[in-house]
Image (spheres, helix red, strand yellow):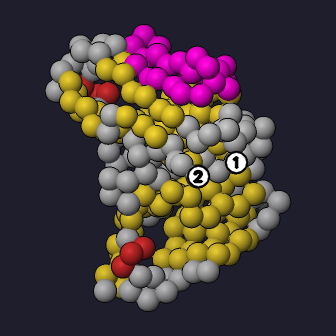
C-alpha cells in the first residue's frame, strides 16, 4: 500500500547546529506535505506545510523542500534550541485529503 | 478559537471490555478524523467523516470498532470488545474541508490501556 518513509528515527544535535529530517512517499499524486511536531504526551501540532506547486518554503528557522520528481521532501531546522526537542512527523496526502504519516523522528537538542 | 476537545484523556480497561471516546471538533469544521497512534509510531487514520457521512473507513477494524457523527458535529468512537493490541492513543482531528488538503487540527488524544 501507500506509505511514507522517514529518516532518521533519532537525531541528536548540539544547540545551534542544524537538523535535517527526510521523507519519501510512494503516491505520485500526493500534493500536500505537512510536518507535525509532537512533544511528549501532547497533541501533534503543524509547524510547516508545503504544496506540490512549490519547491521550498521557509518560516523563520524552519524550512521544507520538496522534490516531486524524486518523491521526497525534507525538514530543515537551523540554529536549533533545546525547545526544538520533540518527535517530528512528516505526512503526505493520499487521494487528495487522506494523510499518511511517517514513523517519526525523535530530535534531541543538547545545550 | 477553541481547539478540538476529546474525553476522556485516559482510560484503563480489561480485554474484552467496551470503551467509548468522544470528540468535539472546532466549530464549523466539516471534516473529522479519528487516528490511532501506537507508541513509537505515527498516527494511522481509522475513519474520516465529511459532515455526518463516512468518507473513508478502510482502515477501521469493523468487527470491533465503530464510529458515528450523527449531527455532523460531535463524534464517538467505540471499541467492543477491546484487545490488548488496541492500547494506543486515539487522536481526533478536524479540518475546515476535505475538498483540498487543509491543515488538520488535532485534539489532545485519549490514552487507552488494555490490560
How many other residues sit within 10 Å of disc 1, few (<14), some (14-19) or many (≥20)?
A: some
Near-viewer residue (B66 or A5): B66
Q: Residue at 66% x, 19% y: name it.
A: B53
Magenta segment boundaries in residue numbering:
B51-78
Counting from the top left corner in percent of width and height, residue A35 is at 57, 59
- Location of the N terminus of chain A (image quadrant): top right
Q: Residue furthest right?
A: A53
Q: In the picture provided, is A44 more to the left or to the right than A27?
A: left
* B76 inside magenta stretch: yes
Q: In the picture provided, is A41 more to the left or to the right than B33?
A: left
Can the viewer see residue A23? no
Counting from the top left corner in percent of width and height, residue A88 is at 46, 61
Instruction: Tell me, for residue A107, which label it has, or none.
Output: none
Please identify the quarter of the rendering in which residue B71 is found. top right
Q: Nearer the viewer, mark 2 or mark 1?
A: 2
Q: Is residue A17 above or below residue A3?
A: below
At mark 1, the secondary structure is: loop
Near-viewer residue (B4 or A41): B4
Q: Is residue B8 above or below residue A5?
A: above
Q: Is residue A87 above or below residue B113?
A: below
Q: In the picture provided, is A102 more to the left or to the right than B104?
A: left
Q: Identify residue for label 2.
A: B1
Counting from the top left corner in percent of width and height, residue A64 is at 64, 69
Q: Identify residue for label 1.
A: B102
Are the numbered discs 2 and 1 placed on the same chain, yes or no? yes
Q: In the picture provided, is B63 more to the left or to the right than B86?
A: right
Q: How far is the residue under mark 2 from the one under mark 1?
A: 17 Å
- Location of the C terminus of chain A (image quadrant): bottom left
At mark 2, the secondary structure is: loop
Q: Earlier in the sequence, mark 2 or mark 1?
A: 2
How many other residues sit within 10 Å of disc 2, few (<14), some (14-19) or many (≥20)?
A: few
Amino acid at each position: 500500500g501507500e506509505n511514507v518513509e522517514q529518516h532518521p528515527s533519532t537525531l541528536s544535535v548540539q544547540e545551534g547546529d542544524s537538523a535535517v529530517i527526510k521523507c519519501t512517499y510512494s503516491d505520485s499524486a500526493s500534493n500536500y506535505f505537512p510536518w507535525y511536531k509532537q512533544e511528549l504526551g501532547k497533541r501533534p501540532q503543524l509547524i510547516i506545510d508545503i504544496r506540490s506547486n512549490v519547491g521550498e518554503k521557509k518560516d523563520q528557522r524552519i524550512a521544507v523542500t520538496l522534490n516531486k520528481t524524486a518523491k521526497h521532501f525534507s525538514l530543515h531546522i537551523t540554529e536549533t534550541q533545546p525547545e526544538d526537542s520533540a518527535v517530528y512527523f512528516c505526512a503526505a496526502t493520499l487521494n487528495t485529503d487522506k494523510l499518511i504519516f511517517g514513523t517519526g523522528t525523535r530530535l534531541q537538542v543538547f545545550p | 478559537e477553541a481547539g478540538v476537545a476529546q474525553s476522556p484523556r485516559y482510560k484503563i480497561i480489561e480485554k474484552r471490555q467496551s470503551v467509548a471516546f468522544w470528540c468535539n471538533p472546532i466549530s464549523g469544521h466539516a471534516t473529522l478524523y479519528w487516528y490511532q497512534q501506537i507508541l513509537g509510531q505515527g498516527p494511522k487514520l481509522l475513519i474520516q467523516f465529511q459532515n455526518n457521512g463516512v468518507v473513508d473507513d478502510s482502515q477501521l477494524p469493523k468487527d470491533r470498532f465503530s464510529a458515528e457523527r450523527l449531527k455532523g458535529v460531535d463524534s464517538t468512537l467505540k471499541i467492543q470488545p477491546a484487545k490488548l493490541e488496541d492500547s494506543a492513543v486515539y487522536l481526533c482531528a478536524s479540518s475546515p474541508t476535505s475538498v483540498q488538503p487543509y491543515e488538520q487540527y488535532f485534539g489532545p488524544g485519549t490514552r487507552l490501556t488494555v490490560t
